[in-house]
Amino acid sequence: MNTRTKDPVYIIIPVHNRKAITLKCLETLSQNGDLHRYHVVVVDDGSTDGTSDAIHSLYPEVTVLNGDGNLWWTGAIKKGMEYAYNQNAQYIIWLNDDCYPQKGSIDQLLDLCQSNPKLIVGGQSLDPDTLEPSYGGIIRNNYLIKEIHTQEKTIVDCDGLNGNLVCFSRQVINTIGYPNYQIFPHYHGDTTYTNLAKRKGYQVIIFGEAIALCKNDHPQVCWLLPERPLLNYWQDYFKIKSASYWKAEINYYKAILGSSGIIIYLYQKIIKFWIFVLIGTIIPLKFRQQFKKN
């Protein structure tokens, strides 16, 4: 199909050195008809595994934008959004390359967004092995930030969306600009951006009809019986690629919970962590295992 006949909808996929995963995502879009119906933009942030060459060869209709390896997720999404906006995109869809929308899911998201320009709609991701919810959104619950999901054929309001599969109109960019890649280079750029939009008057929802398969690669850690040495987790606090990267996470807590979020972050993520380090040091493993069983 000639790209000039495509709908003014741009699917933006940030990638880095996951060629097989990226190609599977594009294959899914092709099989669903989305690749031919909508514009697809892959932002390849400095991959060295031949990702861009493979895309050019197998999917020449896909636009590839290149980064230098320092865009991370939020910078790549921003770059793709800027390109789409300048191409007169009316709707933008965020899609992670390890997230595989089921047939019709993207159409479902678009139908809702087109019915109300003040909507930002996220799909519900399910683990492909268990079909349990993996990614959806977040809600503010008193002084906590909690994950939230929805059931099939239902809609739930939330305070922010995971960026795995999200659709919104051009109007959102007109209102709040682009995600803040400087404060949130890799994680939390999605939830804070959609949360900011909510605070500016948009309704943020998860739509249970729009299903994608996406493995949960951030399982909850059992601090009594961690899979790695606890000090390895502490090192993650200083890695941009980690969900625990402290500079992004403390600002995430502040963005969602207000100024009190800084205190809550320090308690939830720093003080409690070192309490578990102390417990792991003074309580033998067999007693911790018994405690977990009980």
Image (cartoon, rainbow, N blue to C red):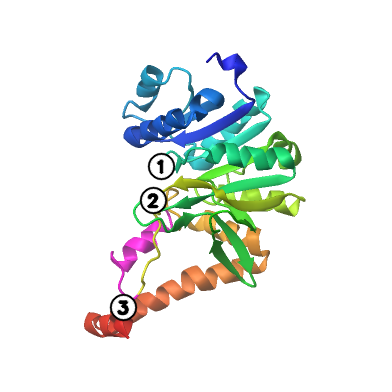
Report crowding for label 3: few under 14, some 14 to 19, many 20 or more residues within 10 A (C-alpha). Answer: some
- Read off the residue under disc 2: 215
Rendered residue at 33%/65% (across/down): 231
Q: Which mark is residue 19?
A: none
Q: Decide if residue 23 is on the left or right side of residue 290.
A: right
Name the N-terminal-most of marks 2 and 3.
2
Range shown magenta? 224-238
Residue 69: image location, x then y, percent? 43, 34
Residue 87 sits in which quadrant?
top right
Rendered residue at 34%/32% (across/down): 19
- Read off the residue under disc 3: 280
* Residue 255 visible to an observer of this rendering: yes
Instruction: Give the structural element (helix, strand or loop) at label 3.
Output: helix
Compared to 164, does 154 lie above or below? below
Report crowding for label 1: few under 14, some 14 to 19, many 20 or more residues within 10 A (C-alpha). Answer: many
- Read off the residue under disc 1: 98
Report crowding for label 2: few under 14, some 14 to 19, many 20 or more residues within 10 A (C-alpha). Answer: many
Rendered residue at 55%/32% (across/down): 11
Name the N-terminal-most of marks 2 and 1.
1
